[in-house]
Amino acid sequence: MGTLHYNCGHCGTLLRTVDSRVGTRTTCPACRGLNIVPDPATMPLRRTPKWLILARLWIIPFGVAGFWGLMLSIADKEAAWTVFLAGVIGTMVITFVWWGFVNIATYFYNPATYEIWKKNGGDPWFDTLPPVLNNDPEEVRYQELYRESVRQELENMNMELGLDGSFGLNPPAPPPPSDPTRRIDDAKFI
């Protein structure tokens, strides 16, 4: 038995239960609202907030800038602030330039993929960061792209095999009538 986490539908409190209780009613201890334990397969996948990813990314450069600012503050307070602000602003500018470059390059390389990626709140730059910064599983990062690639793959297989969506052979289209005044459903046509 595993543990299942879900949010209360009334107050948003994070609730925990065993996965064998899927589909049963529970009461939220915070607001006393009734909830039905959702099936994990139907629960929407949550992404790590972008501000948290940026905080993880910037903590080391900001820390280094703060350290050198503190070291210089002993000798010159103005130089300390200059070094600290230069480090912080430089890190932010580099991050946003790289973010913009990746988004623009993805858009121009394959606009359809870019639109699918952005459809469910994804971002090419944030979703491709390593797990230290963005610890979302691949099912969350690439969920729309996975669905679209599977749909496209099935569609291509069906076209190669001559199958329609119901996995039956497509009947050949009847040839057009030689005389335009006669219709296909005319009994004397054949």
Image: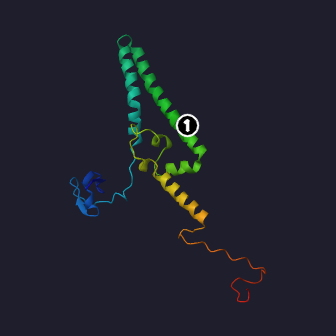
Instruction: Name the residue that disc number 1 marks.
Output: 101
Which residue appears at 60% of the width and 44% of the height? 109
Q: Return the x and y of residue 62 as percentages of the image width and height.
A: 39, 26
Residue reaching furthest to the right:
179
Q: Is residue 145 left or right of residue 67?
A: right
Q: Is residue 75 left or right of residue 190?
A: left
Which residue appears at 40% of the width and 22% of the height? 65
Residue reaching furthest to the top:
75
Front-most of residues 82 and 157: 157
For label 1, the SS is: helix
Front-most of residues 60 and 80: 60
Residue type pointed to by label 1? Phe
Front-most of residues 92 and 116: 116
Q: Quadrant of residue 31?
A: bottom left
Q: Return the x and y of residue 24 as percentages of the image width and height.
A: 26, 64
* Picture quarter with the N terminus: bottom left
* Picture quarter with the C terminus: bottom right
Q: Return the x and y of residue 117 as percentages of the image width and height.
A: 50, 49
Q: Is residue 14 above or below residue 33?
A: above
Q: Is residue 67 left or right of residue 103?
A: left
Q: Is residue 136 above or below residue 163?
A: above
Which residue appears at 33% of the width and 60% of the height? 39
The color scheme shown is rainbow
In the rendered picture of this protein, how many numbered marks are placed on residues?
Answer: 1
Front-most of residues 145 and 175: 175
Q: Is residue 68 left or right of residue 112?
A: left
Residue reaching furthest to the front:
161
Which residue appears at 58% of the width and 40% of the height? 105
- Near mark 1 (Cα within 10 A), the count class, few <14, some 14-19 or many ≥20, is few
Q: Return the x and y of residue 22 as percentages of the image width and height.
A: 28, 61
Q: Is residue 129 above or below residue 189?
A: above
